[in-house]
Amino acid sequence: MTDDTTNAPLPEVSTPLNGDAQMRAYGASDDVPEFDDPAFTPLSRPLSEARVAIVTSAALHRFDQEGFSPSDTGFRTLDRADRNIIMGHWSPNFDHTGFQLDHNVVYPIDRLEELAADGVIGDVAPQHFAFAGNQPATVSELRLDSGPACAKLMLAAGVDVVVLTPV
Amino acid sequence: MSALAHVFEAAGLSTVVLASMKEVAERINPPRTLYCEFPLGRPLGRPDDVELQRDVLLRAFGLLEASGSVLETYPLVIESDEQPLSCSIPPRFDASLPPAIDEAQGLRAAYDRSLERRGKTNVGRAIDADTVVDALRVLDTWASGEPWTEHALPGKLTIAVCHDIRAYYTEAALELANGPTPGGRSVEAWFHDETEAGKTILAARAELKRQDAPFPFWFYMTPGHR
């Protein structure tokens, strides 16, 4: 989660107009959710046989899908072949132009296809998923509702590995 | 992202996180993290840099061999570029109009070319391209000190309207600019430092703050550090 959803002003840092430094300082001081006794799932097969999915917090969606609301805790499903996608993230606090120039800088679907063609990974998942990074601090909906629902879809599709990309 | 990794691992999936904020990743502590100090919004590094993007993924996948929690740092740092994009702004055409409106009209052809070439636009969250000028007219009125409550903004939500204006300008600018791929925040710097629309939004934002408008109504009109 890289975004601010509180009303607190951003902290001052030494370079007044360095937006990334200010956002990183903000993130370092922001509340984060706690996970007691976190799970660790080892990869059960060689990477060259594993099916890989991307999950991004960039709030990506197709034009025919509902956009993200400012407090959206759900996710959108992107098919493997989808490229005509836009970024529905509400935060003005990070660069949006990189994605406009090349979706792979946020959503590296073409790189995955190449790695699969080269035999580095086993397969590209049939579907990938986008959440919005600006979530309530507790992320309780993600933990209890939309996150497990997304995991269930991936498991049903035979996904072994998830690459998570932030913005 | 890091929080979702815990949810997915608990469900039986193996995850690798490309983290853009090291301290956040350290505290949430997902099982496998590759911290990449790249411009925020560009987690794979650089647009159109296939080799770099591939290497980032290969290093991330390499973390799957670890038998326990691991956080590694990608060896390359890419800093955000705060220097304004080199992009000409149309000269004044109709001096009777507020400068931002004249400017937005002057950029319309470039925006339309971008839309035709890319087949998509990020404008449309609250207003369409035809309404950009009307929204700028209200923002200009707000910036002049008029009570914001007496002048309704097309699209209503300031954060969404300002997003659409910024997207309109960004798409036009990427069509007009020559030279190397712009770095992170270079288009943002161009918009807020050099364009009349960007300056109008900053001025309207300052005026809303002065008039005690609700915090979320004005704060998210621009990047927070501005």
Image (spheres, rainbow, N blue to C red):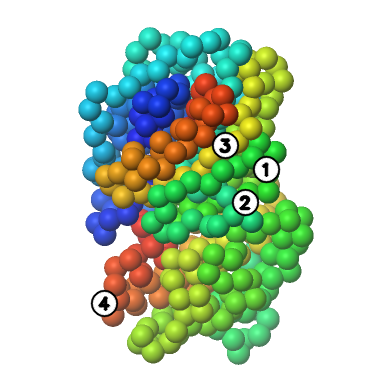
Distance of label 3 from label 1 (alpha carbons): 10 Å
Residue B54 figure quarter: top right
Callout 2, which amino acid? Arg
What residue is shown at x 42% (from left), y 62% (from top)?
B222
Q: Which residue is mark 2?
A: A62
Q: Position of residue B172 (x, y in %)?
A: 66, 62
Is the C-beta separation of discs 1 and 2 under 8 Å? yes
Q: Which labelled disc corresponds to residue A128?
A: 3
Q: Sequence-wise, which precedes: disc 1 or disc 2?
A: 2
Callout 4, which amino acid? Asp
Is label 1 or label 4 in front? 1
- Same chain for mark 3 and mark 1? The answer is yes
Q: Chain under label 2?
A: A
What residue is shown at x 52% (from left), y 54% (from top)?
A88
Distance of label 1 from label 4 (alpha carbons): 44 Å
Distance of label 3 from label 4 (alpha carbons): 43 Å
What residue is shown at x 36% (from left), y 85% (from top)?
B149
- Same chain for mark 1 and mark 4? The answer is no
Q: Callout 1: helix, strand or loop?
A: loop
Q: Sequence-wise, which precedes: disc 3 or disc 2?
A: 2
Is label 4 or label 2 in front? 2
Distance of label 1 from label 2 (alpha carbons): 8 Å
Q: Which residue is mark 4?
A: B212
Callout 1, which amino acid? Asp
Q: Sequence-wise, which precedes: disc 3 or disc 1?
A: 1
Q: Residues within 10 Å of mark 1 (few under 14, many from 20)?
A: few
